[in-house]
């Protein structure tokens, strides 16, 4: 583990794996940097992969404010630490942060988004605008687990039977403890990314979906690709929303390697 300090003084924990051109993974808000480790190992033979803790995760501490502009500053600090142009993968809600970072002109050469939330204004797959408030009410009533389940149902679109299975899984207490982070995630993904931000993402972008995922996530990914100036949407066989590294890794490696060939 290494530490880089964000603009407002927040310590951001990160790991680096492998050797070669740099790739940064921005995980979802439910995850710490370990969520990116399996994919990092898959890419490590060809790339140096950086995984880092978003705010409220792991050794970065529970540091407010949980705002997209603060998180872009966190990513900017890590890219500055790398000291070279990077390729970036944004996973789930991490895709929103990656998109916003690319729009600011940071030295990002290639952008990949895996199953992003809805970022366009059509509203077909976005989180309900009142979801964060309803989740906060449940947390205030001492029901953090119900808040997480509500997020999974209305924010992610998981079927009721899948949510029931998750609540019986060994990792459920850890998810329940992240209820407040889920509120932030719901708030982050409830509003579309402004059209002017999407228009400013001019780097080549690959938007990926798994072939075994939920239809609303495929729709959101296709919508994101259609709204960006230089993007394509591709469905990856052999994976779902959990992003199987062996399926996704070769697709990403081919895409990221093209940035080096273009130099």
Image (cartoon, helix red, strand yellow):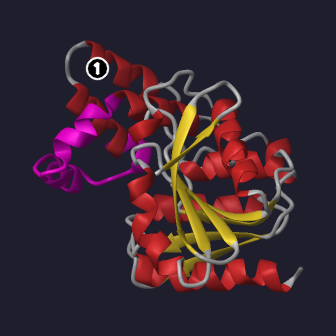
Is 200 on the left or on the right of 1, as rendered? right
**Magenta stretch encompasses residue 167:** yes
The C terminus: image quadrant:
bottom right
Q: How far across and down, in percent of the image, does residue 110 sit?
A: 75, 68
Rendered residue at 60%/83% (across/down): 46
User: Is residue 63 placed above or below 189 in the rendered structure?
Assistant: above
Q: Can residue 198 be seen in this view?
A: yes
**Magenta stretch encompasses residue 60:** no
41 vs 213, nearest the viewer: 41
Q: Report the magenta stretch's main SS.
A: helix
**Mark 1 residue element:** helix
Count neighbours of disc 1 (C-alpha within 10 A) and say few if under 14, some if 14 to 19, many if 20 or more.
Answer: some
Q: Can residue 119 be seen in this view?
A: no
Is 236 on the left or on the right of 230, as rendered? left
Magenta residues span: 153-179
Is 52 on the left or on the right of 165, as rendered? right
Q: Residue furthest front?
A: 2
Rendered residue at 66%/34% (across/down): 6
Q: Residue furthest top?
A: 140
187 vs 81, nearest the viewer: 81
Q: How far across and down, in percent of the image, does residue 44 sit?
A: 53, 78
User: Is residue 180 placed above or below 203 in the rendered structure?
Assistant: above
The number of numbered discs placed on residues in the rendered structure image is: 1
- Residue position for label 1: 139
Rendered residue at 39%/44% (across/down): 30
Rendered residue at 49%/45% (across/down): 53
Q: How far across and down, in percent of the image, does residue 94 sit?
A: 56, 50
């Amino acid at each position: 583990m290494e530490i880089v300090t964000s603009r407002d003084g927040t310590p951001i924990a990160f790991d680096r794996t492998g050797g070669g051109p740099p790739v940064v993974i921005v995980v979802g808000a439910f995850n710490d940097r370990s969520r990116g480790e399996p994919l990092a190992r898959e890419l490590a033979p060809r790339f140096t992969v950086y995984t880092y803790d978003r705010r409220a995760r792991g050794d970065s501490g529970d540091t407010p404010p949980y705002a997209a502009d603060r998180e872009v500053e966190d990513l900017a600090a890590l890219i500055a630490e790398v000291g070279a142009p990077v390729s970036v993968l944004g996973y789930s809600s991490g895709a929103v942060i990656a998109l916003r970072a690319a729009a600011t002109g940071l030295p990002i050469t290639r952008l990949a988004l895996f199953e992003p939330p809805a970022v366009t204004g059509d509203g077909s797959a976005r989180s309900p605008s009142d979801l964060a408030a309803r989740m906060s009410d449940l947390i205030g009533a001492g029901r953090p687990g119900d808040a997480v389940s509500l997020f999974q149902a209305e924010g992610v679109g998981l079927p009721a039977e899948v949510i029931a299975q998750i609540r019986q899984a060994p990792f459920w207490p850890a998810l329940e403890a992240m209820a407040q982070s889920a509120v932030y995630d719901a708030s982050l993904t409830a509003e579309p990314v402004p059209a002017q931000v999407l228009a400013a993402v001019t780097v080549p972008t690959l938007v990926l979906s798994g072939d075994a995922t939920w239809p609303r996530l495929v729709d959101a990914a296709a919508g994101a690709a259609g709204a960006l100036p230089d993007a394509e949407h591709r469905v990856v066989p052999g994976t779902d929303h959990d992003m199987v590294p062996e399926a996704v890794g070769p697709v990403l490696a081919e895409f990221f390697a093209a940035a080096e060939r273009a130099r």
